[in-house]
Image (cartoon, rainbow, N blue to C red):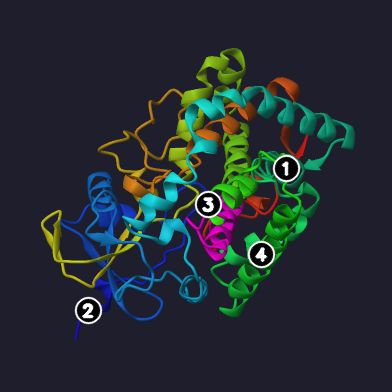
Amino acid sequence: MQDPTAAPAFPMRRCPFAPPPEYDEIRKQAGLSRVTMPDGTKAWIATRYEDVRAILGDNRFSTVPSTPGYPFIAPARASLLMNEHPPTIIRMDPPDHTRYRRMLTKEFMVHHVEAMRPELQNTVDVLLDELEAKGSPADLFEDFALAVPTTVISRILGVPYEDRAFFQERSKAKLDLTADPEVPVRAGAEMRDYLDRLITEKMQDPGNRSDLISRLVTSQVVPGHMTREEALATIELLLMGGHETTANMIALGTLSLLLNPAQKDALVADPSLVRNTVEEMLRFHTIVHYNGPRVALEDVTVAGTQIKKGEGVLALISAANRDPKMFPQPDEFDIHRDALHHVAFSYGVHQCLGQPLARAELQIVFTTLFQRLPKLRLAVSPEEISFRHDAFVYGVDALPVEW
């Protein structure tokens, strides 16, 4: 019988500002290590930067959840992914993934996002006006961090911003790893029903629309390049990914600067540091901390370890971004660090489609926030902040501030 200590239980609980400490110990071991998933099956775990990139960049590993051996990190996650029909593009392998991704690149290309910067700046300015008008104290997460990307992605997709409470609640339910397995499935169904009605409205009254949903309908669904169900899956993914991740990154990034006032002051004094600052925030927090489940489609050797066909693998980007071989003193938050080669947006064909937009939003937020609110500070002690340890996207439940 295998020694249970040789395959510890996964997932492990992360610290507020660091991945689980077990990752450091696993990284020191030769080759890859085994962990025990919640359903009792075993999976390989990769924690070194080079090993994580090797797995994520190798198409001999599948991201399709229905592939036998796929490692599910929680019953709620298994229920959600196995009931996702059709799947989203992030759970497709090439060539399907490649074909559908090409349909979405226009709105998220670097030059397109750069042209949006004045609009993004105006959005941040308006929301800070509203925050100041509301008065101190406030919840920076709800009133600003969540509002910025929600406004932006709603505008890009053509989703009514006034419906934000509906889709924010469903998104949160889908990402809750501790929920009853029926909860994320029901939330997903409600989200797609909502988006299906929205598609119908746009098809009945096409007008002169330039939003992404209208473009998908007219250029992909109507000609038959994409089914209506596939469009729904795609739009749902973009809506969720477009606000959940960036919202939590804004909140955690703000918190990091508040807890490191010398670095905050350096950024205020020299706004050119913002690009480094944002990359370090992305590396340091790695909020999509369970990204990277894969299953081997054939026998593959990584770090001297043979992974057999049908065996699950967890290529943990949060561990890779704390690998001291790549990032000296990795547990220090340092905005002067060159962290551009982090893997917070994943690696390989499944790198985040929206990363140019996320970077632009974050850069604009952090060249504006502390200039507008130079006395911004926490309204509670750091120990009182509640972190979302059990969510697929890490973050905070609230960020009470005053100024």
Instruction: Please tell me whether mark 4 sits on a helix, a strand or a loop.
Output: helix
Q: Earlier in the sequence, mark 4 or mark 3?
A: 4
Is 207 displayed left or right of 218 in the figure?
A: right
Instruction: Please tell me whether mark 2 sits on a helix, a strand or a loop.
Output: loop
Is 139 displayed left or right of 29 in the figure?
A: right
Quadrant in which the N terminus appears? bottom left
Q: Earlier in the sequence, mark 2 or mark 4?
A: 2
- Labelled pair 1, 2 in contact (Cβ < 8 Å): no
Local crowd size for mark 2, using a 10 Å CA cut-off: few (<14), some (14–19), many (≥20): few
**Disc 2/disc 4 C-alpha distance (Å):** 44 Å
Q: Quadrant of residue 400?
A: top right
Residue located beneath label 1 in the image = 147
**Disc 1/disc 3 C-alpha distance (Å):** 30 Å
Q: What residue type is disc 2 on?
A: Asp
Count of numbered marks: 4
Residue at position x 20%, y 81% in the image: 2
Quick check: can you spot residue 109? yes
Residue located beneath label 2 in the image = 3
Residue at position x 67%, y 22% in the image: 118
Residue located beneath label 3 in the image = 220
Q: Quadrant of residue 133?
A: top right
Q: Position of residue 68 (x, y in %)?
A: 30, 76
Q: Earlier in the sequence, mark 1 or mark 2?
A: 2
Q: Which residues are magenta?
A: 222-241
